Each structure stands twice: as structure tokens, then as C-alpha cells.
Amino acid sequence: MAALNRFMTGGFVPPRVHGVLDYPLAAVLIAGPLVLDFDYTAASVIAFAFAGVAVVLAVATAWPTGIVKIIPPLVHGYVDTVMLVAMIVLPFAVGFSYRTNALLFYVIVGGLGLIATVVTRFESPTPVGQPGIVAQPA
């Protein structure tokens, strides 16, 4: 687990950039099924559920763009990873891979999000639960 944590904290994209991108991701997950007119209910419902998760992560992660700051950045990274891999796999697992709009949406958004997650440095600039206090190096 220590090696995985080191990997998750070793990216070159700072937390602030990833945090800013979380908000448009949630908007895309909400707007995508509506704009692209998914004709498969499960594809829309799953995207809306993922949008809810994205909103919670954006608002509640303990980094500069979070509002509530209760979710540790590493947890955010792990949830992002699972959710985005699921976005790529679910069209095939749930049975809407033959619906081109939904398939392309899920694979493109999932793939781009996964790339953004892999290159992000999931480190906490402030101790969880104590906004405004900067951790000092030992």
C-alpha cells in the first residue's frame, strides 16, 4: 500500500489544478446524457450518479479548491481512479456499448479523467479538518 500511496503523491499536476477540473467534470457528467440524448436509461442514471460523486469530491476534498475539506486527497484519488475505470468498463458490463453516443462519452470522459488522475499529485496542503493551517515540514 505504501508504494501505491507514493505513486498517487508523485504526479506533476498540482492539487489546485486537479481541484479546479473537478467542477467542470461534474458539469460534463450532468450535461452529457442530456445534450447527447442517451437513449438508454441506465447510461443516464449512472452518469448522474457519477456526477454526484464528482460534486462531493470537488466540494469536500481537503485541498485549495475544496469547500468543506473533510476528504483526504489520497482518498479522492482512489475514488477517482475506481470511478473512472468503471466509466470505461460499464458500457460493456451493463450492455450499452452498442449505443455510440453513450459509449464514446463514457470512454472519452473516463479515459481523459483517468489520465488527469494518474498525473495528479494527491497531497494535502492542509491538515484534514483544519482549513487555513499549513503543515510544516519536519
Image (cartoon, helix red, strand yellow):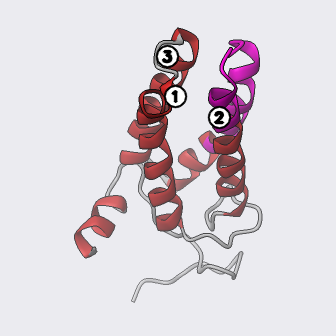
Give the residue displayed 35% in from the left and 52% down from the top: 11
Up the image or down, 50 lies above or below 77; here it is above
Q: Which mark is residue 104?
A: 3
Q: Pointers 2 and 1 in contact (CB under 8 A)?
A: no
Give the residue displayed 73% in from the left and 57% down from the top: 59
Q: Hey, which residue is sitting farthest left in the picture?
A: 3
- Image quadrant holding the N terminus, namely bottom left
Magenta stretch mostly in which secondary structure? Answer: helix
Q: Pointers 2 and 3 in contact (CB under 8 A)?
A: no
Marks 1 and 3 sit apart, C-alpha to C-alpha, by 8 Å
- Image quadrant holding the C terminus, namely bottom left
Can residue 63 be seen at all in this image of the molecule? Answer: yes
| N-terminal label among 2 and 1 | 2
User: Which amino acid type is marked by label 3?
Assistant: Leu
Q: Give whichever of 96, 128 is nearer the camera.
A: 96
Q: Hey, which residue is sitting farthest bottom in the picture?
A: 138
Examine the structure image and report whether residue 57 is included in the region drawn in magenta. Answer: no
| N-terminal label among 1 and 3 | 3
Q: Which mark is residue 109?
A: 1
Task: Decide if residue 107 is on the left or right side of residue 39.
Answer: left
Q: Which residues are magenta?
A: 22-47
Residue bearing the label numbered 2: 47
User: Which amino acid type is marked by label 1?
Assistant: Val
Give the residue displayed 54% in from the left and 12% down from the top: 99
Up the image or down, 128 lies above or below 102; here it is below
